[in-house]
Amino acid sequence: MEKQVNAQASNIAWTGKKVLGSHSGTIDLKGGKFQFENDQIVGGEFVMDMSTITVTDLKGDNKAGLEGHLNSDDFFGVDNHPTSKLVITSVAKKEDGTYGVVGDLTIKENTHPVTFDLDYNNNTATTKLSIDRSKYNVKYNSGSFFSGLGDQTIYDNFDLNIELKF
């Protein structure tokens, strides 16, 4: 059986950290679906609309400036890469409502495996992913690629807190 994700009711929150602080915001879900057998998750995928990256911890010109920068080629290049996608490749039931999941995450046409725990209860799937942006050609102010950045360094890992409603 296949269940469609309710994109409007779902939430994706992001947090990125740098030497002198952090920023947070949201990304809209474009769509998705999960496959079930005997009420157990066996597969699925979801697509994020990268053009909807919003900053929630800033206001005014600072908010607009960071949103524009995140949309630029320095970060996610949304003009050329408007979506990112996660495709579940394997699922292992761990305990009641919790699954060990392996999937392929594609950002900016770069695909890499991710492993995470997914909780599924009451038609809601939740997880937290820690993503190494440098693997996806998102290198701006990364200490992994540039030296001498000092307090301008942005850490490679960013977090996605995902809540998918069905």
Image (cartoon, helix red, strand yellow):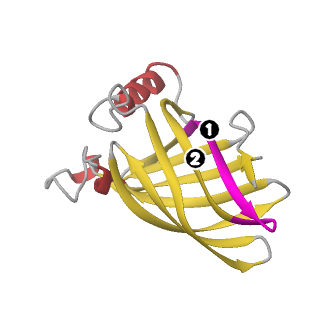
Relative horizontal placement of residue 123, taking residue 163 as reference (left or right): right
Task: Identify which residue is drawn at 27% across, 32% down.
Answer: 73
Q: Disc 2 residue type?
A: Phe
Residue 11 is situated, as x and y percent measured from the top left of the image, at 67, 42
Q: Nearer the viewer, residue 67 or 103?
A: 103
Percent from the top left, x then y, of residue 85?
A: 48, 46
Q: Quadrant of the rendered structure where residue 144 is?
A: bottom left
**Picture quarter containing residue 35?**
bottom right
Q: Residue furthest right?
A: 122
Q: Residue at x 60, y 53 (%)?
A: 161
In percent of width and height, residue 58 lies at: 52, 31
Q: Is residue 38 magenta?
A: yes
Q: Is residue 115 above or below residue 23?
A: below
Tell me, for residue 31, which label it has, or none.
1
The secondary structure that dominates the magenta segment is strand
Q: How many marks?
A: 2
For label 2, the SS is strand
Identify the residue at image location x=57%, y=34%.
56
Residue extent of the magenta highlight = 25-41
| Residue ID for mark 2 | 46
Circles 2, 1 touching at the beta carbon (< 8 Å): yes
Could you tell which of marks 2 and 1 lies nearer the N-terminus? 1
